[in-house]
Amino acid sequence: MPGTRPAMTTDAPRRQVLLAWSGGKDAAWALHALRQRDDVDVVALLSSVTVEHARSSMQGVRREVLQAQAAACGLPLLEAAIPASCDNATYEAAMARALAEANARWPALRTAAFGDLLLEDIRAWRQAQCARVGWEVMTPLFGSDTARLARDMINGGLRATLCCVDTQQLDASFAGRDFDAALLDALPPGVDPCGENGEFHTCVAAGPMFAAPLALERGDTVLRDGRFAYTDFRLDDAPAL
């Protein structure tokens, strides 16, 4: 009819997001949180992987486990290769290259998400790092009550194990333990329930962000740098290195 205005659509394009992926619980839960939203679309995961050891730089999770996690999430895994001993400048350059490669693959992609929870200085550093190359940062879990969040993760079906413990903040006997209610109850006072101050890191094997759980075999625990107790995990069908 003359003068009739066309119907308006509310279907705004969803913002594409690249999620930093360490193999641990916070990254996994950030993916779960982002997938509950209707304004974003996580298109890929990005891990920093050491050249010498083929492991995630913080958690020490094997590359093949990272790849299996990504496959369980139904997402491609991009890698930023860094040396095992890596300064900030080298790390930032590697991440800038990885972001440029991601943008070449997804031209609309200009947002990186991280599983940061509480540390404002770390978030500000990520924002500055990404802004220099024209990217924005999302932190969907930031500001969470970590005691509540930890139990929400467990009650929500996330299954993870402590794969790295800073023995200057937490006893080495916690390395290799399941991230569960019993562990939360056993943590000493002053230790963050999510390990947000670096007390521990985790390796995820199952959760609502995975199509199916991973079968991981627990290996030895070793002390590195006289401080960090690392517990190794590999896929059940992967050969020992």
Image: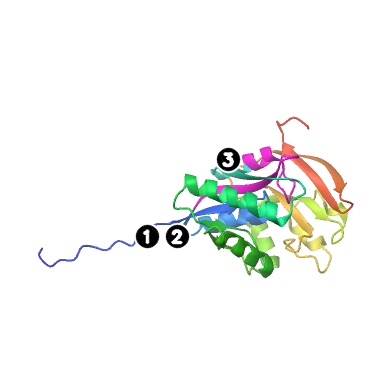
Tell me if label 2 and label 1 are in contact, CB under 8 Å. Answer: yes
Q: Does the segment drawn in magenta span residue 63?
A: yes
Cα separation, mark 2 vs mark 3, equals 23 Å
Please tell me how crowded label 1 is: few (under 14), some (14-19), or many (20+) other residues with Cα within 10 Å.
few
Give the magenta part as a residue range.
42-68
Counting residues from the start of the chain, the first of labels 2 and 1 encountered is 1
Which three-letter amino acid code belongs to the residue tagged 3? Answer: Ala
Q: Which residue is mark 2?
A: 39
- Quadrant of res 214: top right
Counting residues from the start of the chain, the first of labels 3 and 1 encountered is 1
Q: Position of residue 110 (x, y in %)?
A: 50, 56
Per the image, label 1 sits on a secondary structure element best described as loop
Which three-letter amino acid code belongs to the residue tagged 2? Answer: Asp
Q: Residue, x 59% and y 46% (percent of image)?
A: 210
Counting residues from the start of the chain, the first of labels 2 and 3 encountered is 2
Tell me if label 2 and label 3 are in contact, CB under 8 Å. Answer: no
Q: Does the segment drawn in magenta span residue 75?
A: no
Please tell me how crowded label 2 is: few (under 14), some (14-19), or many (20+) other residues with Cα within 10 Å.
few
Q: Position of residue 22 (x, y in %)?
A: 67, 50
Which three-letter amino acid code belongs to the residue tagged 1? Answer: Ala
**Residue at the extreme right of the image, as rendered:** 226
Q: Which residue is mark 3?
A: 71
Q: Which residue is mark 1?
A: 12
Q: Is 64 placed above or below 186 here?
A: above
Q: Is residue 119 visible?
A: no
Q: Position of residue 170 (x, y in %)?
A: 85, 59
